[in-house]
Amino acid sequence: MTAPAPYPSAMTPLVSGRILALDALRGVAVIGIVGMNVLAFALPGPAYYNPLAYGPNHAGGVGPADYWVWLASFVFVEDKFRTLFAMLFGVGCLILIERAGASPWRAHYARMLVLFAIGLVHATLLASNDVLRAYAMAGLFLPLLAGLSAQGLVSVALGLVMVHLALGLTALGPPLVAFHVKHLGSDALLWAERQFGHDAATIAVLLEQGREGLGERVVRRTLGIPGQIGTLVAALPLNLAAIALGMGLWRAGMLKGEWRTFRLQRVAGIAALVALPSLLLLAAWQVAEGFPAALVGPVALVISAPFDMLLALSYAALAMAFLSKDSGLARRLGMVGRMSLSNYLMTSVILSAIFTGWGLALFGEVTRWQAVVLGLVPVAGMLLWSPLWVARFGQGPFERLWRAGARLFA
């Protein structure tokens, strides 16, 4: 049995123990991800982004509560916590690289290989929107980043966001242009409708897939691995941007707990003052246009990305400011964060038990707001079992598996 490491104050150097606020921030990230992941388990794919794609009458109708849940999710949740999770992944990698000394890369690549394998199994059995594969692929580029200064890493992050915007608008721009010039019936608009709108045939196929058995799902998703790799490659610039930002904030001392509370509050306030009005304007644009698929996709996947990252930065600064003191809340969130990989994977187990055909089979049977309420089940589970597990074993089961596998390949 491994005894859990003590929590020093946020100002204590890492070598003397763990940084409570950083672990608590990991806990916040893995809990926040549930807010969107539950929609991927509960509803057909287009409804993840578009509240009109699928509703309680199975024909796209939604109630007021679903609109409000969509708005809150779009502004405060969607891609913010995924970005935060990626930032903290970068921090964790950089900590291990710095500890390893002169020759860290063999062990690092072994960790990325094992993480990719875990993510591949996770995506095949449970969650098609798994992020571990994307982080492992982005992690292959860390040798290009690890030697940079804090300012250099932040500059790289900004540059990669610009790359994501350029590539994303190139890929998703044609449907948006076709929509605005009223080129109705074009291939671009039909494609967008299948991906982000209410195409009846597509929704029917997705409902069928969501209710399939475990064996059928494994076969289908295994055959789809080549296509998944293409999607992961397309997401590399944005994921690597978040990872680089996290590494830069570590090097700058913010995520080490070295910044004063006033400075953290100022960063959080400035980032939020830019991000929140911009996200509200993007939300209003979609509402005013009636959620056309050609607009929903570019806004959710591309245009909102810089503001998602800014709000993730704001969340990180606020957590470092207010979760550094040894309070009951900070300690419990810290325990959740120390098991972030295990909690991320166990969340998928719980959501599969609720929504899949081999569980309670609620896929497609709930509204958006009902799905979010059901998402509280794994959140409660994390908050309950994490302190008990860490107190008994000191390390999460999948964290232990990851490290053991990496040692084997290293």
Image (tube, grey):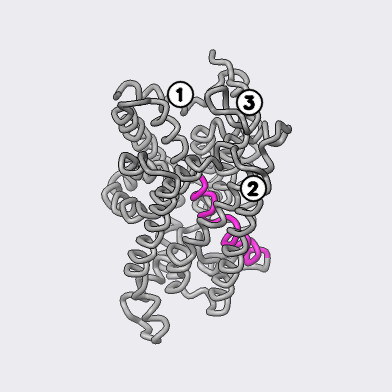
* Residue at 57% in and 70% down: 283
What's drawn in magenta, residue-wise? 65-84
Of callouts 2 and 1, which one flags the residue occurring earlier in the amino acid sequence?
Answer: 2
Q: Which mark is residue 400?
A: 1
Q: Is label 3 in contact with label 2 (beta carbons under 8 Å)?
A: no
Q: Which quadrant of the view contains residue 126?
A: top left
The x, y position of residue 288, in whole percent, is: 57, 79
On the picture, is 9 further left or further right than 33?
Answer: right
What amino acid type is highlighted by mark number 2? Leu
In the picture shown, does residue 153 fall above or below 70? above
Q: Position of residue 269 (x, y in %)?
A: 64, 57
* Residue at image coords 26%, 49%: 226
Per the model, the C-alpha gap separating discs 3 and 1 is: 20 Å
Could you tell me which secondary element the residue under label 1 belongs to? helix
Question: Please, is residue 295 above or below residue 28 in the view?
Answer: below
Question: Disc number at residue 7?
Answer: 3
Secondary structure predominantly adopted by residues drawn in magenta: helix
Q: Amino acid at mark 1?
A: Arg
Return the residue nearer the eye: 352 or 225.
225
- Say whether disc 3 or disc 2 marks the residue closer to the N-terminus: 3
Name the spot of residue 384 as percent of width and height, x first. 66, 31
| Helix, strand or loop for disc 2 | helix
Q: Say which quadrant the C terminus sits in.
A: top left
Residue 327 quadrant: top right
At which x and y percent is residue 363? 52, 52
